Image (cartoon, helix red, strand yellow):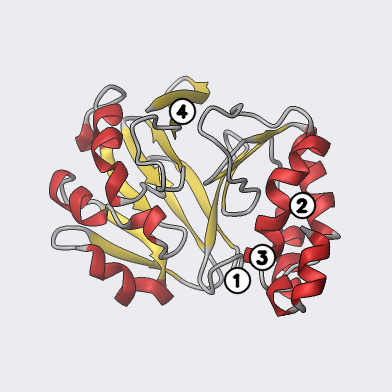
Amino acid sequence: MKIVELYKNKQHSWVMLGRDETKPDKIIDTNQYLISHHEQAILLDPGGIELFAPMLEALVKILPLEQIKHLFASHQDPDIISSLGLWDQVLDGAKLHSPWLWEGFIRHFGMEHTKFAPIPDEGGSLNLLGLELQFIPAHYLHSSGNFNVYDPKAKILFSGDLGAALEPIDSPLFVEDFNSHISKMEYFHQRWMPSEIAKQDWIKRVRELDIEMMCPQHGRIFRGDKVTQFLDWFEQLPVGIANQTSTELDSKR
């Protein structure tokens, strides 16, 4: 599994963990992120049960596990949080921050020791030893209860499935040519994002943030002007296309 430091400033850092070459071929590739601040850390969308072993092996190379006091699950999908029952056994009473809507579902993955910290629909924040992380609503994109995480110090937005592209694990880590990247993410966003109203609400919220890097849960990371390019592109993209006729769908693929 690759370990890539995205941001480092004194006692504050962001690390991406992913592109695991040992994962089974039919398991979707995912990006996991670790935010560490003054010897306390939060793991964002820690991944599915199939990735637990390589994730654990990678994390112990970065920091003592006892520093991971918090977990975050943007929504309920198994590629995001089905490893919870295993993290529950190795982390000492961590808090899981996740949409209130999905608590009864997420608990099916196992929560004997982990404390559930529900995020209300309007969002919220987490104070990580002085660092105020913001939980940004992203409802229906694609889950009915869904959040992003914004770090105002690093100016990084963890965007979950927004900006995602399903690519081979040997693909570049960053988007360099936005126009050529469109074909790799267009159908995913049209098929998985169901609501024009939800889309426009999220874009309005995100445009108000100072973002230098947008980190999705799948595929490449956007940085600099690529973030604005994504927002401009997504703003005009038709979504919820599964309700169209098969002929219309075929013409768009």
Residue located 58% across and 40% down the image: 167
The answer to which of marks 2 and 3 sits earlier in the sequence is: 3
In the figure, is residue 83 to the left or right of 213? left
Give the CA separation, mark 4 to mark 1.
30 Å
Residue indicated by mark 4: 13
Which residue is label 3 attached to? 191
Among the two numbered marks 4 and 1 on one chain, the one whose residue lies closer to the N terminus: 4
Nearer the camera: disc 2 or disc 3: 3
What type is the residue that disc 4 sits on? Answer: Ser
Question: In which quadrant is the C terminus drawn?
Answer: bottom right
Question: Looking at the image, which is closer to me, 88 or 176?
Answer: 176
From mark 2 to mark 3, how far is it between C-alphas? 23 Å
In this rendering, the label closer to the viewer, 4 or 3: 3
Sort mark 2 into few (<14), some (14-19) or many (20+) by Cα contacts within 10 Å: few
Image location (x, y in percent) of residue 14? 48, 31
| Element type at mark 1 | loop
SS assignment at label 3: helix
